[in-house]
Image (cartoon, rainbow, N blue to C red):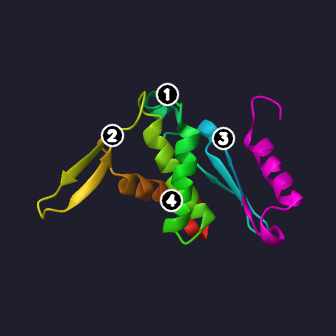
Amino acid sequence: MPSPPTKELIEQACRHFLDMGVGPDGSGAVIIRSGAMGACVARNGQPMVWVDAYWSGPANSHKVVDVTGAGNSFLGGLGAGLVLTNENVREATLYATVSASFTIEQEGLPRFTLATDANGHQTELWNGDSPQRRLEELQERLATMKGTRRAHDL
């Protein structure tokens, strides 16, 4: 693939992989992670969907400190997302994107803490932020871009 990659080239690669036959009877999915461009999600018979990188755009470029481990974090988030979304590949890609967002905003591992609210409920925080809040923000961003309220309907 020529450098630098473009969304058009990534989409061509997705189509090529799908044409080769992915999954049982060609029913699998292809996800190509593309750094700052986000991730392209493709399945036969469905429109391709781009999931923006969480820290996308020039206003957030200062948030990206070290991309070491982002791919591993993305794959871990994807695996967890597949379990949590009953194997909804597009929705799971949102989990993957959020997971990677915590890895790239500092050198080394994200910082994990527990916060307790007034009712005594504990919430996990990574780098001082909630993964659930980021997931909901990313879902809202995609919904706004596509004119729908639910990312899994994309």
What amino acid type is highlighted by mark number 3?
Ser
Residue 102, percent from left and from top: 43, 41
Q: Earlier in the sequence, mark 2 or mark 3?
A: 3
Q: Which residue is mark 2?
A: 127
Point out the frontmost of discs 4 and 1.
Answer: 4
Marks 4 and 1, how far apart at CA: 23 Å
| Secondary element at image label 3 | loop
Q: Residue at x 21, y 51 (%)?
A: 115
Point out the frontmost of discs 3 and 1.
Answer: 1
Marks 2 and 3, how far apart at CA: 24 Å
Image quadrant assignment for residue 88: bottom right
Q: Which residue is mark 1?
A: 66
Q: Earlier in the sequence, mark 4 or mark 1?
A: 1
Q: Residue at x 80, y 42 (%)?
A: 9
What amino acid type is highlighted by mark number 4?
Ala
Point out the frontmost of discs 4 and 2.
Answer: 4
Marks 4 and 2, how far apart at CA: 19 Å
Point out the frontmost of discs 3 and 4.
Answer: 4
What amino acid type is highlighted by mark number 2?
Asn
